[in-house]
Amino acid sequence: MLIRHPDDILPSEITTPRLYQERRRFMSLAGGMALAGILPAGTAHASPASLGPILKSPLSTSEGQTSFKAVTTYNNYYELGTDKEDPAQNTHRLKTSPWTVRVEGLVNKPRTFGIEEILKLAPLEERIYRMRCVEGWSMVIPWVGIPLATLLKLADPQGSARFVEFVSHYDKATMTRGVLDWPYNEALRLDEARHPLTLLAVGLYGELLPIQNGAPLRLVVPWKYGFKSGKSIVAIRLTEKQPVTAWMKAGPSEYGFYSNVNPEVDHPRWSQATERRIGEFSKRKTLMFNGYADQVASLYSGMDLRRNF
Ligand SMILES: Nc1nc2c(c(=O)[nH]1)N[C@H]1C(S)=C(S)[C@@H](COP(=O)(O)O)O[C@H]1N2
Ligand SMILES: [Mo]
């Protein structure tokens, strides 16, 4: 994201939602048949573990969804490689089971959660969100997750807590070295973190998160550029001081703390006024706060969004 502009996904690569449904149906069928002893057991492993009942959220957009194929093969996950196609090909470099997340720092109830516990903290919701990468492309993704606010409430933040930092898993033996000061970390103001739109995602398209999308647990903050949504999170830390994030360290003039999607504030090396929705030919106008202004603009009232980019 530091250097490259997006390559576009060829229309021929796009799976239609219909085909996708068929594929899912086939896989759950194959899984069931293997359990019943009709197919050899190995076949069942092709079936991703399912997430059970998922509520539909009123916070979802009704815009057309980006294909499952594009969502899972055109990724930014630098620990698994810096080309868009790399993460999907390097999933063996990350083991997601067992997995724990520490909630720590300025909280009255610090706690380490197993990923299975997080799946049970609240009913899972589907949130279909627009996502806008700082490089100029966008997608519409049906995430599955729970509000981050639910987890924060359990930890009981102390009065002095003002920021929430998210630390991603890093293993230098198997993951990219250089590029950024690892581990990847991101952060939000506490009120942004508690906002109902802020999601802890555990799945997409009704299934467990693919590794390239940040398994087993990632943040999703739809009104900010994609890099604020850290993947494969191992620690959530409440702090008083504003954390310095990996991208701020790498390029302080290019990546600010807020990184709210803003068509009026250019990246120093390119305009942010338009975007390419993956799977579409013509460009779209980028919307203030990625189209979520009604819900989030009040978080920034009185702030100069050019200075606080
Ligand atoms: N740990 C980690 N999280 C990350 C990144 C990364 O390189 N490492 N890339 C970010 C960027 S720039 C974007 S646009 C989104 C992409 O998410 P997706 O591949 O699921 O669409 O993940 C974000 N989270
Ligand atoms: Mo991004």
Image (cartoon, rainbow, N blue to C red):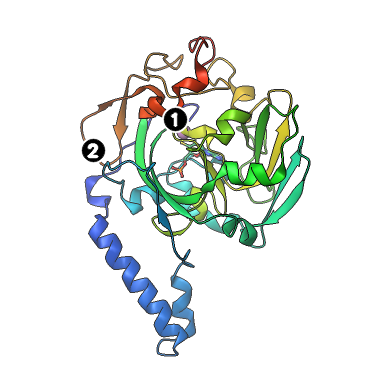
x and y, in percent, of residue 114 in the image: 68, 58
Query: Mark 1 is on which residue type?
Result: Trp
Marks 1,2: beta carbons within 8 A: no
Looking at the image, which residue is at 49% across and 36% down? Answer: 221
Number of the front mark, 1 or 2: 1
Q: Nearer the viewer, residue 117 or 220?
A: 117
Q: Which residue is mark 2?
A: 280
Could you say which is closer to the camera, residue 299 or residue 259? 299
242 to 302, vertically: above or below: below
Q: Position of residue 50 (x, y in %)?
A: 46, 66
Horizontal and vertical percent position of residue 297? 45, 21
What amino acid is labelled 2 in the image? Glu
Q: Residue at the location (31% across, 66% down)?
A: 23
Q: Residue at x 44, y 84 (%)?
A: 34
The Cα–Cα distance between marks 1 and 2, rounded to whole angstroms, is 21 Å
* Residue at figure coordinates x 72%, y 36% from the top left: 157
- Disc sitting over residue 238 in the figure: none
The quadrant holding residue 118 is bottom right
Ranked by sequence position, the earlier of labels 1 and 2 is 1
Q: Is mark 2 within 8 Å of ligand 1?
A: no
Classify 10 Å Cα crowding around label 1: few (below 14), some (14-19), many (20 and above).
Answer: many
Viewed as shown, does residue 249 lie left or right of 210?
Answer: right
In the image, farthest residue toward the bottom: 37
Camera-nearest residue between 244 and 189: 189
Q: Is residue 189 visible?
A: no
**Few, some or many residues within 10 Å of mark 2 (<14, 14–19, 20+):** few
For the residue labelled by badge 1, is the local secondary structure a helix, a strand or a loop?
Answer: loop
Q: Where is mark 1, residue-wise?
A: 223
Image position of 167 (left or right of 8): right
Answer yes or no: is residue 70 visible: yes
